[in-house]
Amino acid sequence: MTTETGQSAGTLPDAGAHGPGSMKDGREPVLRGRGMVKTFGRVVGLDGVDIDLYAGEVLAIIGDNGAGKSTLIKCLSGAYTLDSGEMSLEGRPVTFGKPQDARDAGIETVYQQLAVIPALDIAANLYLAREERRPGILGSVFRMLDKKGMRDRASASVQGLGIQTIQNMNQAVETLSGGQRQAVAVARAAAFGSKVVILDEPTAALGVKEGNAVLDMIKGLREKGMPVILISHNMPHVWEVADRIHIQRLARRVAVIDPKDYTPQEGVAIMTGAMTADEVESRVADRRTSGAGSA
Amino acid sequence: MTQLINPRRTRGAIIVSVAGLALGLAACSSSTTTSPGATGGGGDKIGVSLITKDSSNPFFVAMQKGAKDLAAKEGNIDLTIASGKQEGDDQGQITAIENSIAKGDKGILITPMSTGVNSAIKKARDAGLFVIALDTPPDPANTVDITFATDNFKAGTLIGQWAEKQMGGKPATIALLDLFSDKVVSVDYNRDQGFLTGMGIDVKDKTKNGDEAKTGSYKDGTYTIVCNEAGQGAEDGGRSAMERCLTKNPDINLVYTINEPTAVGASAALKAAGKTATIVSIDGGCAGVKSVTGGVIGATAQQYPLKMAQKGIDAVKAIASGGAKPATSPGLDFFDTGVALVTDKPAAGVTSITSAEGSKICWG
Amino acid sequence: MTATTAEGETQQSAAQRELSRRSQSPLQRVQHLLHGHPWISPLLLLVLTIVVFSVVNPRFLLANSLSLLVQQTAVVAALALGQTLIILTAGIDLSVGAIAILSTMIMASLAANNGVPGVLALIIGIAFGFLAGLLNGLLVTRLNLPPFIVTLGTLSIFTALALLYSGGSSIQDNRLPDIINWAGKGFSFLGFRLTTGVVIVLVMYLVVGFALSQTAWGRHVYAVGDDPESARLSGIASKRVLVSVYAVAGLIFGISAWVLIGRSGGATPNAITDGNLQSITAVVIGGTSLFGGRGGVAGTLLGALIVYAFTFGLSLAGVDQQYRVLAIGVLVIVAVSIDQWIRKVKG
């Protein structure tokens, strides 16, 4: 993959460096955002952000606190509505007025706060707002839920993702540990996501083993051809799974880098503004010419 | 964080106006309507406020309506009607009294909620208003200038005497259906203890319900008191209260009720249980008198709220034009506006009027 | 959590020993059981109440007594059913009784004073309950005001409307068509004496209970009450669910009005004056949490029965009325404390 930066010569990042209809290796992005602006009163969440997500890739979004990462994905998932800017999915323009619109379009999101209902059980959470009814009159007239069917299918989904620690679909989610709840939330997104899966800090509250299990799940999704957007503070995890890394800084996209060509320290430097992208670019170029390969 | 649906300013305006409406309705616990006196006529209007306990009890509704009609007839009365929200709402009456002072009324007619309103009444009198209590004398009675009230104890005694004659010496199995569980409202214990006294039963403390002996003798025979149950003064409460009493003792043959709605509920409970009993009550509203005609209630003591309102307005008019204060009835610390026994089964030695006569002078 | 060193292994089994010892605590097992089935504690409390009061006065257990108890509970149980739905969404409705009274006055007055045919008057009265509930729901969701404040305001509005409309006077059943009095009709069943009103209330409980446990709407009600933001992010139309809950509750209050007319023998503006507090008491004692998301209608029915069984039993025991009020107050505190304890259960 070629390296791309969003920054031309000069101090201001040029968010429109790619222009509309950008392609990579001749491919159209699955999900594309241009000039996305979101404000909260006087506070600027997104200041004209662009984003591209290609099929079968894992795009990581990194940035310091307050850089706009969560805001960005909440706009993509329908939790927020854009003040201005446009989004398109598989080439068609889309607007999301509420979370259900994004889900209907095939975009599944796992939020930082997980958005699971503690009082309900695992199967109920998996099927929340997409409950399945029993066949025949019981389902259509009496609107009875197919609880057993949902439980069985939920169990299959969860096992299929390699999550061993959850056995009983009847357990209330509040009795699960943090890692298990994360697994439920990821399982929900993976099971129903048809076009894009977005994960906001999926390994943040997890231990080493559970964190690795989530990374394996992400790789599994990529193998199935599902593109994944991943927000994370955990640089080792990011460098392990990401195909490209979108760097958010001060409500803008300042760079998109390839983890093969940049070190995590360089990525962090761009993220915090310690170095400009140009400085990093030249260091990478030096490395190439000196034949040191990827860091 | 969440989407803003309305522009902030519009939402703010809506919130302020609805909050104001809701708070105004909820917190302003006195309801007030003003009825102007008759048309035209120069001369000073005499300001009078009628403050009842609530505006939902038919008794007070009748009193308010009577006062409005009277004020319209008199012509130079500027009448304001106010009340608390429900039994126990002292603050509502206090607010109404203060409004009356501010308005410059000459007099206040009030059915005092409790001793909690005494200091507000004193403020009104200090400000030169003439304050008259209706229906219930305050405690102490000289808190107000004069009270026009029913002698509730006498009302109870009348129906007690009638019931005693009806029993004719047979053992009386008695159910007492009172007003509230707290037993502090004067009308509650006056009527109950009056009834027992009329029966010839020793009530021990006349201001306490339920302290009398559960068995003993009344004037001509023996009695058993099965229960003291509170029916909240309404049909559904009266029914539940009667059901509990019947469960304790299915052979109740005499039921005292605080008012006619309670009696109607008690009667429904008896009917459902396939039992009959003599039911006595107090109030004498037109609906209640109909119950006597229909045989549901054996006898009821009729009182005259419109007369109270009339005398009250007359008194304020008289004082305002420099006349004399009215006097209390002999032996009482209030002016007795009278009570009559309404029954179609007269008992020897107890004066009564028929229900037909009662329906001509009933209230409500 | 597997051990890797020999020393680690010993430490681990020491901790495991501690944990397995702790998890055997019967109190914790009870806590877990109640957490999954919050209606168990009110059921036990009801059974305990009946047993204790039957010992004190065996007349409590007569078929006739139990029949009366059920009839007395019916109206408040119906109001509490609607209140349960609202409290499940972490809301509260103070206008409960007022909506029911307003409905009784409308259906009775239309039939008796305006000559409207009985069935139509009944339907209009019930429809008013539905609209009143809908109004509450719209005010709560559109204005984003706490339900306590909104229903405090509508309580006064509906009470005033009922008084203005009725002029403070009652309408007795002899002036009403049979269909409106129908809920008061008595019949015998297996030696118990019940009214059709009781059956109407039970049917409502079954229908609402079914909806809450077997339909998607029911799950969404719990979700919105437990964590409204998570529910929204999960794609649930939270505001629509809330409005539907208040509207359905209003419909239930309208039907309660029908039962109330049967019980009172007419429509009176003074009936069930503290219906709102009584309904909340029944819901709380029944184990539904005031914080939303937990509980159900079975508990509420038990809670209502417990309140009336207490009153009935204390009366049969000859206990003074003032102590009964105290007893119900203590009951509520105990029920809320148990709810708080159940919530603390850990994995």
Image: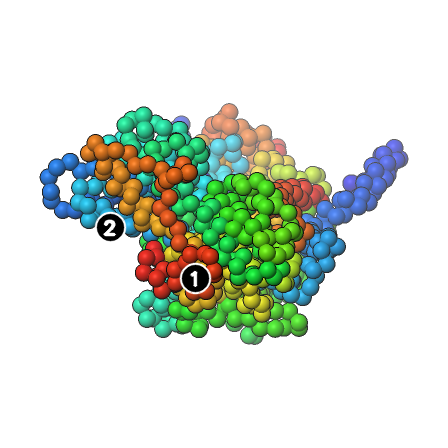
Q: Nearer the viewer, residue B81 or B131?
A: B131
User: What's the chain of the residue with tag 1?
Assistant: B
Question: In the figure, A235 relative to A194: above or below?
Answer: above
Residue at (52, 59) in percent of width and height: B165
Q: Three-letter amino acid code at disc 1?
A: Thr
Crowd band around label 2 with a 10 angstrom C-alpha radius: few (<14), some (14–19), many (20+) = some
**How far apart are the alpha carbons under marks 2 and 1?**
29 Å
Circle 2 SS class = helix
- Name the quadrant of the N terminus of chain A: top right
Circle 1 SS class = strand
Kindly report which numbered mark, 2 or 1, lies closer to the viewer in this rendering: 1
Q: Three-letter amino acid code at disc 2?
A: Asp
User: What's the chain of the residue with tag 2?
Assistant: B
Q: In the displayed orientation, state which residue is furthest to the front.
A: B349
> What sort of colour scheme is used for the picture?
rainbow
User: x, y percentage for residue C339?
Assistant: 64, 45
Residue at label 2?
B69
Residue at (32, 25) in percent of width and height: B126
- Residue B23 seen in the figure: no
Q: Nearer the viewer, residue A154 or C317?
A: C317
Res. A85 image quadrant: top left
Residue at (58, 35) in percent of width and height: A233
- Name the quadrant of the C terminus of chain A: top right
Crowd band around label 1 with a 10 angstrom C-alpha radius: few (<14), some (14–19), many (20+) = many
Residue at label 1?
B343
Question: In the figure, B41 relative to C83: above or below?
Answer: above
